[in-house]
Image (cartoon, rainbow, N blue to C red):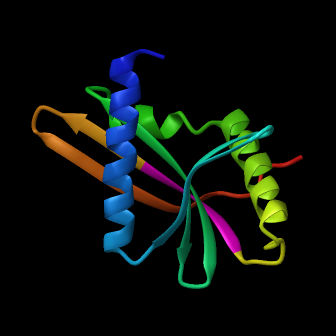
Amino acid sequence: MTRARLELGKEGEDLALRKLESIGYRCIERNFRCALGELDLVARDGETLVFVEIKTRKGKSLDYAKEAVHARKQRQISKAALAYMKRNGCEEAKARFDVVVIHQKDSGKHIEVIRNAFDLAYP
């Protein structure tokens, strides 16, 4: 991955976190990694454990960023979320998957939070 893409991703994660905190989410962990995959952000929204996938795109359409969370990606996120829950003893917690899409254009940034973006996709 190029340095520019890494920087764009980091900037997007920071923007997403600020947006989520402004609407009441509380960050638990960023960039959780395990053998099964990675979670961009783990947060709490009230009593609900939320696994957040963040997609940042520059210049391309908002729909292009949304389409990046396809079925294979959903399965990978689901596996990592189950591993997170097992590792942290919260298998019984109410949980959901959200996606934050950030579209950057010359005219500014558009941030969209999609709650309950997809269901558990494993196995």
Q: Nearer the viewer, residue 102 or 60?
A: 102
In the displayed image of the protein, which residue is found farthest to the bottom?
47
Q: Nearer the viewer, residue 75 or 2?
A: 2
Please state the horizontal and vertical placement of residue 80, each as a whole percent of the image: 75, 48
| Residue numbers of the magenta segment | 95-100
In the image, taking residue 67 as reference, residue 17 lies left or right, namely left
Magenta stretch: dominant SS?
strand
The image shows residue 81, relative to residue 65, as above or below, that is: below
Whether residue 2 appears in this view of the structure is: yes
In the image, taking residue 26 as reference, residue 89 lies left or right, namely right
The image shows residue 29, relative to residue 76, as above or below, that is: below
Q: Residue at x 73, y 55 (%)?
A: 81
In the displayed image of the protein, which residue is found farthest to the right?
123
Q: For residue 89, what is the image quadrant?
A: bottom right
Whether residue 63 appears in this view of the structure is: no
Tell me, yes or no, whether the highlighted magenta stretch contains residue 90: no
Please state the horizontal and vertical placement of residue 19, each as a whole percent of the image: 32, 62
In the image, taking residue 5 as reference, residue 80 lies left or right, namely right
Q: Residue at x 54, y 84 (%)?
A: 46
Q: Residue at x 45, y 73 (%)?
A: 25
Number of numbered callouts drawn: 0
The image shows residue 63, relative to residue 88, as above or below, that is: above
Q: Nearer the viewer, residue 33 or 95?
A: 33
Please state the horizontal and vertical placement of residue 64, each as a whole percent of the image: 42, 31
Please state the horizontal and vertical placement of residue 40, each as a whole percent of the image: 55, 47
Tell me, yes or no, whether the highlighted magenta stretch contains residue 99: yes
